[in-house]
Amino acid sequence: MTNSTVSGKLLTEQKQDSEMMSSLPTKLWYQTLAIMQEDAPELIDEYLESTAAKMEVTVDYLIEEFLLPMEGTYD
């Protein structure tokens, strides 16, 4: 493997890692969800579906991995 091939591969892996990290829910995302629960609960399903689609995961996975462990955090 040449140095340019190794460099290209590392850049690709770093880009994939940064894309994954940028798709994780942020504190602002959780705060928005908490506000929606109080003021606009009818929009929560759409919000979760949109987020799951952007992350390329199922809504069930999003809930299990990112919401159930956070229960009560922003109450």
Image (cartoon, rainbow, N blue to C red):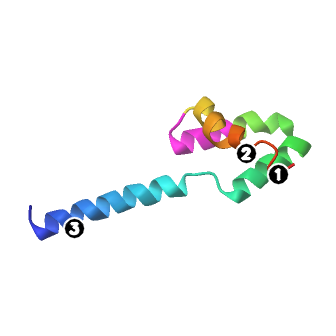
Q: Which residue is mark 3?
A: 7
Q: Residue furthest top?
A: 60
Q: Residue at x 15, y 63 (%)?
A: 5
**Badge 2 amino acid:** Met
Q: Are marks 1 and 3 in contact (CB under 8 Å)?
A: no
Q: 29 and 66: which one is in front?
A: 66
The N terminus - image quarter: bottom left
Above or below for 25 versus 6: above
In the figure, residue 2 lies in which quadrant? bottom left
- Label 2 residue SS: helix
Q: Give the extent of the magenta segment.
A: 48-57
In the figure, residue 68 lies in which quadrant? top right
Q: Which residue is mark 2?
A: 70
Determine if the magenta segment contains residue 52. yes
- Label 1 residue SS: loop
**Badge 1 amino acid:** Tyr
Tell me the crowding category of disc 2: few under 14, some 14 to 19, or many 20 or more residues within 10 angstroms, Cα based.
few
Q: Are marks 2 and 1 in contact (CB under 8 Å)?
A: yes
Q: Which residue is mark 1?
A: 74
Residue 68 falls left or right of residue 23: right
Q: Residue at x 82, y 48 (%)?
A: 34
Q: 40 and 19: which one is in front?
A: 19
